[in-house]
Image (cartoon, rainbow, N blue to C red):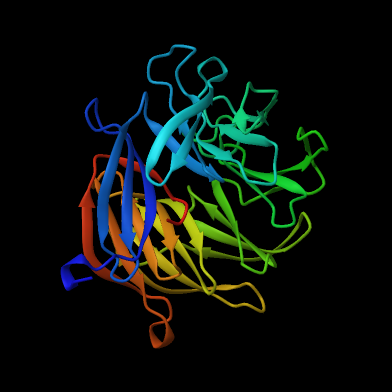
Amino acid sequence: MGLFNKRRNVRPLFVGSNGNDLTRGIYAFHLDIDNGEILKKEFYESPSNPAALCRRERYAFVCYKNRTGRKTDGGLHQYAQMDLQFGLAAKATDDGKTYVGAFVNEKRKNAYAVDYYNGEVVMIPIVKQKITKVAQTIKHEGSSLDERYQTEPHPTSIDETPEGHYMIVTDLGTDEVVLYTILEDGFLERDEEHTFKVTPGSGPKKVVFSRDAKFAYVLNELSSTVCVYQYEDGTFTFVQEIDTYPKDEEDVKNKATDIIVSADYIFVSNAGHDSVSTLEMNKETGELKFIEYMETDENPVCMVLVHEKWVVVACQKGGTLESFEIKKGEYRGVLFETHYVYSITEPVCMIEGRPL
């Protein structure tokens, strides 16, 4: 094989774009893990604005916003994925509900999703590998301090705890991290004993866990902080709260939008400050130490970590995908620009695809 035919070492990425009637949909990219280059491969027009992406085995799942008000719009769509090809396999529209986050994995016979706008958590059975109709809807109740964003419940994310005993939901509107016991049939039951509140007005957005599952990190969108907790089988013990960017540097209106975890570092995106911050983890105590931030394009909203070496950032207002290299050793997780940028209209969600 000649020099110009050298095979690239790549990982697939799928990016959801709001865009317009011509650009709205799901984009498939390759990320070259040798140099961080972003390569566009395919585009799939979507019926509405994508809000979140997740995957289970050979299937990709997309949460769509309801743009038309019709009962057939919005919901959760399931696509069969073969390499970079998508084919619609099933969908659950739930009378036009808009989900902003979903959870599926190989171990569960159910999908779970959260509805920010109606304050609901839902369970959707998976039968013969395909999602069916919504079988359970749980309504959150309550409010908190912020007069704009916290007058009612707003669930923002749903995930499974590391040991698999609970589903965990962040509710930005009520300042709660809600734990649900997973019953034998996949239905959920709220666990009041382990559910807890963050500082009023914080607006929890997402939870991630350290690789050894000893610590949980709660990203707070409204206060732009990360809360650190010691974790053991549903019990969260508070350790620390730390800012997601140096707030004494400049006065900006910021929202902390995403958080990802590597073996040694936490990375947080800041929309307003327009940056990605590196926070170093103490593996003994779980505490975080701010290291540095890297400026991004306008309004970074989501990130993925690829091959423990690259952080890919989607900037909604800037309309770009950017890749950054994680420098280790003496650089302690500082991000460096690769100068590989791809223009894409309003990217809002992203996942790494199945390895090729």
View extreme (front): residue: 1
Locate residue 150 relative to residue 138 in the image: left or right.
left
Split into 4 quadrants, where in the image is the C terminus? bottom left
Residue 237 % position (x, y): 73, 62
Q: Is residue 175 above or below residue 152?
A: below
Q: Is residue 306 above or below residue 309?
A: above
Residue 272 is at least partly visible in this image:
no
Q: Is residue 58 above or below residue 356?
A: above
Residue 86 % position (x, y): 40, 36
Residue 282 % position (x, y): 59, 78
View extreme (left): residue: 4
Q: Residue at x 55, y 14 (%)?
A: 95
Residue 313 % position (x, y): 34, 56
Q: Is residue 136 above or below residue 55?
A: above
Locate residue 172 relative to residue 3 in the image: left or right.
right
Residue 135 is at least partly visible in this image:
yes
View extreme (bottom): residue: 330
In the depicted view, which residue is nearer to us: 210 or 117?
A: 210
In the depicted view, which residue is nearer to us: 80 or 147?
A: 80
Q: Residue at x 37, y 75 (%)?
A: 334
In the depicted view, which residue is nearer to us: 348 or 255?
A: 348
Q: How many marks?
A: 0
Residue 324: name its quadrant: bottom left
Split into 4 quadrants, where in the image is the N terminus? bottom left
